[in-house]
Each structure stands twice: as C-alpha cells, then as structure tokens.
Amino acid sequence: MRYSYSDLAKMIDHSLLHPTMTDADLEAGCKLAATYQVASVCIKPCAVRQAAEWLRGSGVLVGCVIGFPHGSSATESKRYETELACRDGANEIDMVVNIGKALGGDWDYVEADVKAVCGEAHAHGAKVKVIFENDYLTQGGAGLSSDDLKRKLCEICERAGADWVKTSTGYGFVKQPDGSYNYTGATEHDLALMRASVSPRVQVKAAGGVRDLDGLIKVRDLGGTRCGATATAAMMDEYRRREAAGDTTASSGRIGSGGY
C-alpha cells in the first residue's frame, strides 16, 4: 500500500448523523472511531458534550454539524449553534451553505453567512468545513453552469475563512420524476474541480458515496484530505487484510453512489 494505515484512517470523519441514532448508538460510534483512530467523529449538536467525554484522551476530534442538513437557518442561528458546539467541546464545524441563496446568486449573503460561522469557530480554535450539497447544484444557478457555481462557492468560502470545502451532507436526496428520491454525494469530477478551485490553504472533504477502501484511496489521490464515512470498520479492516497479505498495490477504485 502506498499509504499507511494512519494516512488513511486520519482522513476519516466517522459519521454519526442519522436522525434515528440513540445515545447508545452514538456512544458505540465514538468507541469505534477511537478503536480505528480516525480523524474525527461528525456528530449532532445535541451530542457534542457527550462525544467530547467519550473521546477524551483518544486523539479523535469532535466535529459538529451546523445548519444541517439544508443550510436554511438564519445566520445568527448558525453562529450561535457554532458557539454552543465549541463550548461543548467541538474541534471542527461542518456547516451547510444557504443553498437557496447560492442558487439565487445572493453572494453577499452567502459570504456573510460563512464568515459568521468561521469567525465564531476560529475564535474558539475550531476549524470549519463548508458543505455545498452538490446534488442540488447539478443544473447550476444564478446564471452560472453547475461547475461555475461550484467554483464561485469555492472562491467565496476561501475568502470567508473556510478551512475545507465539502461536497455534500450525505442527506441531499433529490426527488425523481417517479416520486422516488436518490442521492449521489461525492464524485470524482467534483472533488477534482473543488481541489482546483481553492488555494493550498483550503482543504477538500468528500461525503457520500465513499464506501470502501479503494474509494477512500481515490479521494486521497484526487487531493481530498477528509472523507465522511459510515463504513469505517469495513474500510480499515480491509486495509489490515491487504497489509497482512502483503498486498502493496491498490486498485484504481472509484467513488460509488449512495449516502454517507
């Protein structure tokens, strides 16, 4: 393997965001994250204080979602939610842009919204990942193509102080003509585009659709430094299996479809 166990494990933000998760589920998820020595857990605001206790001394950071999953909270609500999360022990903040404002081209609003969260988080020593929800941007908006809209958001987020730009929430389901809903999440195209649209100061995070070790490696190859995942155990157990077998190669994996 051309990447070490730590190289890949420390890319993972173990996702604990499903609305049905109980406190017992969240505690078990934090213990799993500590066992596999991932970068962080990404957890609901109501559980940040508990997660900080569960993970104390483990070396795993606590991440908290803000304005999740649709980004439509008022800016002051997002700022205050960030303040509370940081007080409760969050080291990282994953905020969602106001998607409707972005699609409508209200760039001043979008920038001020991101800047408010970044300012609050940075004052507490926390870092910020800004989620675009690319599944909602496939038709473009504000007179821009889909790719140009994403480039514009990258530019705004960097100027506003973001530490990462992030593809998706994992919950951006799009209604189809037959009434069903589906979701793509991170794509290779979007990861490459976002990496090329920010300076080296800003990192890129994938979310959604990365479900195996080869997908995780592909994110790394494309310049991503973090990946939201629920399949943490399967990914890293596969790493250990290949390591034990003396497999020093990695397939040219692809990022699949599906949720966080």
Image (cartoon, rainbow, N blue to C red):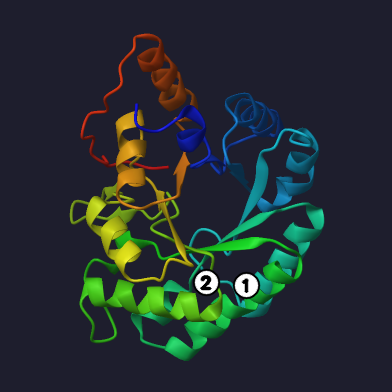
Q: Position of residue 62 (x, y in %)?
A: 67, 46
- The residue at which mark 1 appears reads as 118
> Looking at the image, can residue 140 be seen?
no
Q: Position of residue 103 (x, y in %)?
A: 34, 79
Identify which residue is drawn at 55% across, 59% down. Answer: 68
The amino acid type found where label 1 is placed reads Cys
Task: Label 1, secondary structure: give it.
Answer: helix
Q: Which circle, 2 or 1, is nearer the viewer?
A: 1
Quote the CA–CA distance across marks 2 and 1. Answer: 17 Å
Identify which residue is drawn at 57% across, 26% down. Answer: 36
- The residue at which mark 2 appears reads as 72
Of residues 216 and 223, the one nearer the viewer is: 223
Please identify the quarter of the rendering in which residue 193 is found: bottom left
Q: Quadrant of the C terminus?
A: top left
Identify which residue is drawn at 25% across, 51% down. Answer: 188
Give me the disc on residue 82.
none
From the viewer's perspective, is residue 51 above or below residue 70?
Answer: above
Along the horizontal axis of the image, is 20 left or right of 98? right
Q: Upstream in the sequence, badge 2 or badge 1?
A: 2
